Image (cartoon, rainbow, N blue to C red):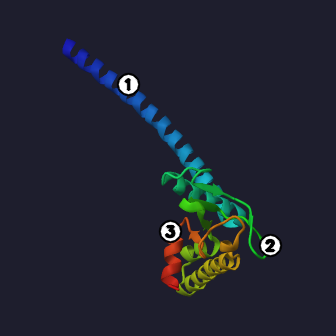
Amino acid sequence: RERIKDFERKVDEKYDNEQKERSSLKGEIKTLHELNKQISQEAHNLTTALKGDSKKQGNWGELILERVLENSGLIKGQEYTTQETTYNDEGDRLFPDVVIQLPDNKQIIIDSKVSLVAYERFVNADEDDERDQWIKAHVTSVKAHIKGLTDKNWHTSKGMNSPEFVLMFMPIESSFSASIRADDE
């Protein structure tokens, strides 16, 4: 009889503990569900902002470029500057995203390029014809940016001792790869 009562007590304790643990687990799952909803909403908001606003896309690309430079060990204000204002020989005001300072008072200019609209439509297209249309639009966008950089004549900028080229930074590697696969020129 004592053993049976002892066994019943142990079973009841085990059942109570499992009930408490189940209740705790249920609460944790609910918290995780809420966090997942919040993260999904924030990701959706970021995606919407980046797809719809070219200024925000540009700001995001510049931020990623700056993080890459910092992670490479470069120090802002010493080894590179951002959004420096300069003028080329034609008198056009230029705002290079980043100017990297090299020895002998030389500089390299880097411009960030983020083009998500056509690329996002290319990635999400269901039909091959539609995909072809959007990858062509994406390549056209990249080429237009390259032409715009070329037309600015950065190397003639006052106070810059820069070679006759500009580095273009594309923070979305898959976007860069897709444009190269579609048109290797």
Whichever of callouts 2 and 3 sits on the residue coming sooner in the sequence is 2
Residue 177 rendering spot, x and y as whole percentages = 49, 75
SS under mark 2:
loop
Residue 119 horizontal side relative to residue 90, left or right: left
Query: Mark 3 or mark 1: which is in front?
Result: 3
Check disc 2 and give the amino acid type: Gly
Seen in the picture, residue 131 relative to 113 is either above or below; the reply is below
**Res 1 seen here:** no
Whichever of callouts 2 and 1 sits on the residue coming sooner in the sequence is 1
Residue 20 rendering spot, x and y as whole percentages = 42, 28
SS under mark 1:
helix
Q: Quadrant of residue 134?
A: bottom right
Check disc 1 and give the amino acid type: Asp
Q: CA distance from mark 2 to mark 3?
A: 34 Å
Tag count in the figure? Answer: 3
Check disc 3 and give the amino acid type: Glu
Quarter of the figure with the N terminus:
top left
Residue ID for mark 1: 16
Residue ID for mark 3: 173
Label 2 close to label 3 by CB (< 8 Å) = no
Query: Mark 2 or mark 1: which is in front?
Result: 2
Residue 33 rendering spot, x and y as whole percentages = 53, 45
Q: Residue furthest front?
A: 104
**Neighbours of disc 3 within 10 Å: few (<14), some (14-19), many (20+):** few
Q: Nearer the viewer, residue 93 or 104?
A: 104
Q: Which mark is residue 91?
A: 2
Residue drawn at x 70%, y 64% as measured from the top left: 159
Q: Nearer the viewer, residue 42 or 54?
A: 54
Whichever of callouts 3 and 1 sits on the residue coming sooner in the sequence is 1
**Neighbours of disc 1 within 10 Å: few (<14), some (14-19), many (20+):** few
Q: CA distance from mark 2 to mark 1?
A: 80 Å
